[in-house]
Amino acid sequence: MANHKATRKDVRQSAKRRERNRYYGKTTRNAIRNLLASDKTEAVASLPKVISMIDKLAKRNVIHKNKASNIKSGIVKRINALA
C-alpha cells in the first residue's frame, strides 16, 4: 500500500463499507431464513419487508440486480407452494 493520506483514508473507508455490507447481507439472509421457516400467514405478512431488504442490497451493489430477482422469485415460489 502506498503511504499517502488519500490511500490510508480509502483503506479506512473500504473497511467501513465492507463491514456495513456484511451486516446488511447477513441481516437479509437471516430474514429470508426466518421467512421460509414460518407458516404461510406469517410469511405473506413479512414478505414485503424481506423483498424491500433484498432490493436495497441490489441498490447498494452488495448483490447483483439479477441475483436479487432470482432470490425474490424463489421466495415467492416457496411461499405459494406452502399449504
Image (tube, rainbow, N blue to C red):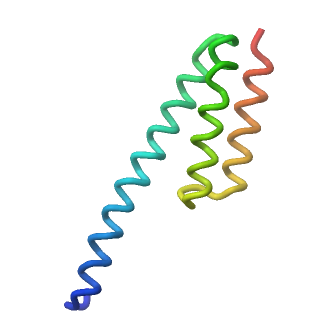
Q: Position of residue 30 (x, y in %)?
A: 48, 32
Residue at horizontal 61%, vertical 44%?
54
Q: Position of residue 17 (x, y in %)?
A: 38, 62
Q: Position of residue 53 (x, y in %)?
A: 57, 41
* Position of residue 71 in the picture relative to residue 73 (left or right): left
Image quadrant assignment for residue 81: top right
Residue at horizontal 72%, vertical 55%?
66
* Position of residue 71 in the picture relative to residue 53 (left or right): right
Residue at horizontal 65%, vertical 37%?
51
Label tally: 0
Q: Is residue 5 above or below residue 11?
A: below
Residue at horizontal 66%, vertical 31%?
48
Q: Position of residue 52 (x, y in %)?
A: 62, 40
The C terminus sits in image quarter: top right
Image quadrant assignment for residue 8: bottom left
Q: Is residue 16 above or below residue 56?
A: below
Q: Is residue 49 above or below residue 15?
A: above
* Position of residue 41 in the picture relative to residue 4 (left or right): right
The N terminus sits in image quarter: bottom left
